[in-house]
Amino acid sequence: MRKIIAFLVILTSVSSSSFAQEAYRRWRIMNEIRNDKFDLVLPAVMRENNIDMWIITNKEGNFDPLYPDMGAGYTTQNGYYIFTDTGKPRIERAALGIDGGFLEGGGSYDYFGSEDELKDYVTKRDPKRIGLNMSKMIGGADGLSYTMYQHLAEVLGKKYEARFVSAEKLTSDFRSRRVATEINVFTEAGNYSYQIAEKAFSNEVITPGVTTLEDVAWWMKEQLFKNNLESSFGMPSVYVTGPDGIVATSTDRIIQRGDILMLDWGVGLMNMYTDMKRIAYVLKEGETEVPKSIQNAFDQGVKVRDIIKATIRPGITAEQNMTNIYNALQAAGFSKIAFNKPNSDDKTDVIIGCHSVGNWGHGIGPSIAEWNPVRFKYVVRPTNLLSIELFAYTPLPEWGGKKLRIPLEDDAIVTDRGVEWLYPINKRIQVIK
């Protein structure tokens, strides 16, 4: 206890200096998120999934994907975050073989011990179902390595090995059900994301005939460094779209007048990651506004987005939400297609992929996207975060009827009322003069 108090005294003293204030603020917020989730989310999701004990393993140099959610910490060899449902309202929390000032100072755990205590700790509590992070389809729920499984089986013995179960659904539920502090951080990340993206698609960054796609992408990467941010994108996807699809992405291709530019990226802040898109048009000589055909294609995409937002509801599966969305879109005159396979008619074709978002650009919660087959079956619940993503294909006369793909994507939260935006979304094609 004295070590924790001393650590907090040091933190408080350094936080008065400007270089430490932001780091200290972020540390405090992440502690609040963790404690709120342990108090408010963890009991419900453990009981819903019928798991008495959840063991999250870590090895030095090989951490579970939930390592930052759990508070990180220092592991010499093997370490375990252990959560036990004792029947009381509060879930018991322990860290064995994991310590450090930041972890211990966060106030999230009841007990810190050595990794050698694992067998005695589990035996005394005698859990009937032990959840381990094993998953065939969800990477974020598959942190247990083969050798660590063998290690647990050897230490705990056959009696408890027979009680091992997958914590796949528990992991998804724990991460995707959000508390207020978490939503606040995600909103802050969203504000960073759209402001950097929209500035990137401006004359402050782009000079037609001079600036390359990769110049824009590297400028955006530089903004991450300046603001101590991360990203789930290796490189921002800055690309040009033409009659035959994408021409080039984040390359040395020079931006020319008449280009239709797209941007796909996200920002990481305090373990929360956004995913969004923006669109720009580079005016030709003599033009003062976006050509009407391109503006019409964008407007069709906005109509699609409005229908999606008005249709999504909590309390039903992601799959049922998708069925409802496509039914509404078809009733409004839009056609459903496979990705990048538009019809050769005069209608606007649509494909959606409203995936989970949050602790990565692609989260592990319920996902209204067929390419997330397991999460496609999960029930959408209030506080889930979704990327409202769509691709709308509308014919352009100047392209001989070939269709311009308009990608729209911004992040939202599911509430009892439906879907609500968390920051200013994309409502226009940006103009580069």
Image: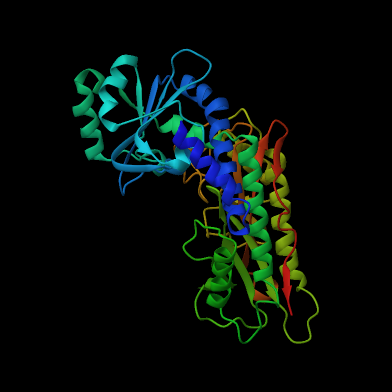
Q: Is residue 181 above or below residue 21?
A: above
* Colouring used for the render: rainbow
Q: Position of residue 432 (x, y in %)?
A: 72, 76
Residue occupying the point 21% across, 33% down:
151
> Residue 218's image quarter?
bottom right
Please tell me which residue lies in front, 197 or 303: 197
Q: Is residue 320 above or below residue 209?
A: above
Q: Is residue 333 at least partly visible in the picture?
A: no
Please tell me which residue lies in front, 106 or 44: 106
Q: Position of residue 126 (x, y in %)?
A: 32, 14
> Residue 131's image quarter?
top left
Quadrant assignment for the C terminus? bottom right
The residue at the far right in this view is 288
Q: Is residue 264 above or below residue 68?
A: below
Q: Position of residue 2 (x, y in %)?
A: 46, 33
Q: Is residue 86 at least partly visible in the picture?
A: yes
Please tell me which residue lies in front, 224 or 367: 224
Numbered label tally: 0
55 vs 16, left or right, is left
Q: Position of residue 213 (x, y in %)?
A: 56, 76
Residue occupying the point 66% across, 50% down:
188
157 vs 106, left or right, is left
Residue occupying the point 73% across, 54% down:
424
> Residue 323's image quarter?
top right
